[in-house]
Amino acid sequence: MNEPLDDMYRDIILDHYRAPRGKKAVEKADIESEGYNPSCGDEVELQVELEDGTVKDVHVDCKGCAISVASGSMLAEMCKGKSLEEVKKLSGVVKQLLKGTEVESREDLGDIDALQGVKKFPVRVKCALLAWATLMEGIKNFEGNGTVSNKTSTED
Ligand code: ZN
């Protein structure tokens, strides 16, 4: 990673990149979604297992740059145990953080806070948003018509 990110942010991002969370497959995928970020070439595959409306387990398989992998890893870590409503809210906060708009609540952001260093590099924002956009598409499909699988792209 060549971006001059602040050291603190860089260390957290590299930690997730080197040891991504959510590598293990889920037992049963209730939501499945794939995403692609053409501007960088990042690819992500997501699986979510639900139990009583909350996220029991998340599997994230991301092939891409450090920022896309780290963001997917943070997603896996942070979404576990949350309801889909909470996950959607968190995704909204991540978007605000990366677009540099006012963040409603910084509470419980955990390592995601480190992604704010990325907003200085607009081209990398799509990398950081890929896993989250992919998850949102998966949830939308799941809630809309119960389909499990879909593909999404962060290209506008
Ligand atoms: Zn990327």
Image: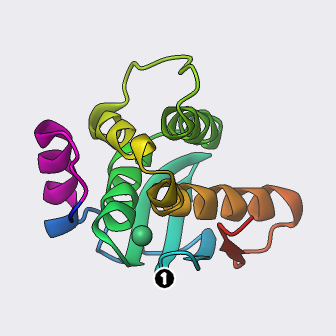
Residue 22, relative to residue 105: is it above or below? below
| Residue positioned 11% across, 48% down in the render | 11
Q: Secondary structure at mark 1?
A: loop
Amino acid bearing label 1: Gly
Q: Within the image, what quadrant is residue 91 found in?
A: top right
Residue positioned 39% across, 61% down in the render: 72
Find out if the beta carbon at label 1 lies less than 8 Å from the nearest ligand 1 atom: yes
Q: Which residues are magenta?
A: 3-16
Is residue 10 magenta-colored? Answer: yes
Q: Residue at x 50, y 60 (%)?
A: 123
Q: Is residue 4 left or right of residue 92?
A: left
105 or 79, which is in the foreground?
Answer: 105
Q: Which residue is mark 1?
A: 41
35 vs 12, left or right, is right
Instruction: For the C terminus, give its image quadrant.
Output: bottom right
**Residue 133: percent from left, percent from top:** 62, 58
Q: Is residue 136 left or right of residue 8?
A: right
| Dominant secondary structure (helix, strand or loop) of the stretch shown in magenta | helix
Res 19 visible: no
The image quarter in which residue 137 lies: bottom right
